[in-house]
């Protein structure tokens, strides 16, 4: 991750200086910002593990002590409970309230009764997105909100605009992702929804596609095995691919 690279480079020289006499989280935060100016430290909190402080920067986690004499970048395990402390905290930090999603900026695809909901940030040039989209064809009773998130290639934005400007956005998206059928949209409609999706994703540190967000707020970066996805949404795979209805 970019933040980790910045931290690693900064540590070569930053820790040579005088240690801070930090006594609380605000002092630790100030000391970190002074020693690691390249790292955008967002928050610091004391952990109930030894004398460790957890710091977050740019969506990443690292650890230090009250005097900021070291910075630890990596996974922290609780030897007593066997819990992956870093993984659990990242899950908490990355959670996105489903109600906070700008759903009016997404392509809405309903299958079956649409009772289960999921949001996906996807790029039309994303191979993993295409594979996952094909897998989703076999899932019934689901509403999929697809946010066009063109970040991978120079022409990702052009393709996203053409899909958004199609008369049937959902069909255009599915046809392109599962059949490689080019969208018929002329990309001259109002594509502000794509800008809003990009802004939201940037704010939430969504850095890759697909990124899946479930109703409970859990966020999964990357395509999931369909069996794992089904288990998560608590459904059963349909025996055959159901027909899809689309809404603009």
Image (spheres, grey):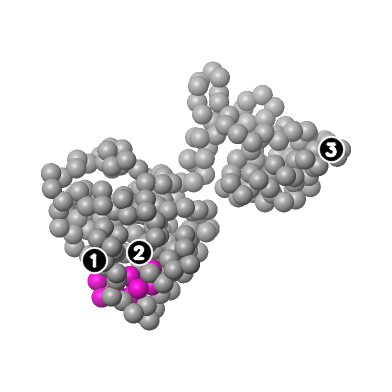
- The dot on residue 50 is none
**Disc sitting over residue 106 in the figure:** 2
Q: Are marks 3 and 2 in contact (CB under 8 Å)?
A: no
- Mark closest to the chain's N terminus, 1 or 2: 2
Residue lying at 66% horizontally and 24% vertically, measured from the top left: 50
Q: Is residue 51 magenta?
A: no
Say which of 30 and 175 sits in front: 175
> Is residue 169 shown above or below 114?
below
Q: Nearer the viewer, residue 217 or 133?
A: 133
Rendered-image quadrant of the C terminus: bottom left
CB atoms at circles 1 and 2 under 8 Å apart?
A: no
Residue at x 67% of width, y 30% of height: 52
Q: Which residue is mark 3?
A: 16
Residue 161 is inside the magenta segment: yes
Nearer the observer: mark 1 or 2; the answer is: 1
Who comes first in sequence, dot 3 or dot 2?
3
Up-down: is 185 above or below 173? Answer: below
Mark 3 vs mark 2, foreground winner is 3
In the rendered structure, which disc, 3 or 1, sits on the residue that comes first in sequence?
3
Q: Is residue 189 left or right of residue 180?
A: right
- Residue 94 horizontal side relative to residue 127, left or right: right
User: Which residue sits furthest top?
Assistant: 80
Percent across and percent down for residue 127 are: 37, 53
State which region is magenta: 160-171
Say the numbered circle drawn on residue 171: 1
Secondary structure beneath disc 2? loop
**Marks 3 and 2, how far apart at CA:** 49 Å
- Under tag 3, what secondary structure? loop
SS for callout 1: helix
Counting from the top left corner in percent of width and height, residue 53 is at: 67, 34
Q: Is residue 114 left or right of residue 91?
A: left
In the image, 173 versus 51, the foreground residue is: 173
């Amino acid at each position: 991750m970019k933040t980790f690279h910045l931290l690693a480079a900064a540590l070569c020289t930053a820790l040579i200086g005088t240690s801070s006499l930090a006594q609380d989280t605000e002092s630790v935060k100030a000391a970190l910002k002074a020693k690691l100016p390249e790292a955008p430290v967002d928050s610091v909190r004391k952990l109930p593990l030894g004398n460790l402080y957890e710091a977050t920067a740019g969506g990443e986690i690292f650890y230090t002590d009250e005097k900021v004499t070291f910075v630890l970048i990596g996974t922290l395990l609780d030897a007593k409970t066997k819990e992956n402390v870093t993984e659990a905290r990242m899950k908490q930090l990355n959670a996105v309230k489903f109600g906070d999603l700008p759903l009016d900026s997404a392509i809405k695809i309903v299958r079956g009764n649409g009772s289960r909901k999921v949001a996906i940030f996807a790029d039309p040039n994303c191979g993993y997105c295409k594979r996952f989209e094909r897998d989703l064809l076999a899932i019934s009773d689901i509403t999929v909100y697809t946010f066009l998130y063109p970040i991978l290639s120079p022409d990702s934005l052009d393709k996203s605009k053409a899909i958004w400007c199609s008369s049937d956005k959902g069909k255009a998206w599915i046809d392109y992702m599962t059949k490689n059928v080019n969208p018929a949209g002329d990309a001259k409609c109002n594509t502000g929804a794509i800008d809003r999706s990009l802004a939201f994703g940037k704010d939430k540190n969504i850095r890759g596609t697909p990124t899946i967000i479930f109703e409970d707020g859990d966020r999964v970066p990357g395509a999931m095995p369909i069996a794992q996805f089904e288990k998560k949404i608590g459904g059963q795979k349909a025996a055959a691919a159901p027909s899809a209805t689309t809404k603009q």
